[in-house]
Image: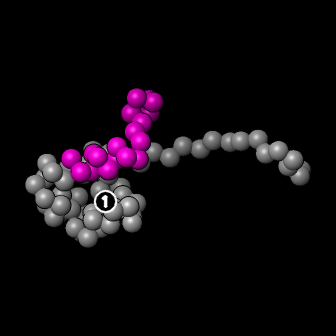
Amino acid sequence: MSASNEIRSADVFGAINRAIMSAGSQKDFAAKAGVSSAFVSRVMHGLSAPSPKLLKAAGLRRVVSVHFEFVENADV
């Protein structure tokens, strides 16, 4: 994935909101995504993390990266 594809969390909510508006309603978007309208509401209120199905319906996907750090005073 290139850095240009990376978006901030706030932009995720914006993309989901645009997808909801494009679908016509939260209920219609939820049906398209295969999730409940209540779940979409919980996501939009920050109470639940967006599922892969919801992200896909909004044209997004979650990408997890791993990094390593030095630990000071580590007991080896």
Q: Where is residue 14 in the image (x, y as percent from the top left)?
A: 29, 46
- Please identify the dominant SS of the magenta region: helix
Q: Where is residue 42 in the image (x, y as percent from the top left)?
A: 32, 66
Between 37 and 33, the one nearer to me in the picture: 37
User: Where is residue 72 drawn, in percent x and y?
Assistant: 82, 44
Residue neighbourhood size for the residue with mark 1, other residues' Cα within 10 Å, grouped as few (<14), some (14–19), many (≥20): some
Based on the displayed image, in which of its 4 quarters is residue 11 positioned?
top left
Write the start and end of the magenta stretch as one range: 1-18
Q: In which quarter of the image is residue 1?
A: top left
Decide if residue 26 is on the left or right side of residue 5.
left
Q: Is residue 46 left or right of residue 40?
A: right
Indicate the secondary structure of the residue bearing disc 1.
Answer: helix
Q: Which amino acid does label 1 sit on?
A: Met
- Front-lying residue, 64 or 17: 17
Q: Which residue is painted at 32% across and 50% down in the image?
A: 13
The residue sitting at 23% across, 58% down in the picture is: 33
Q: Mark 1 points at which residue?
A: 44
Colour pattern? one colour
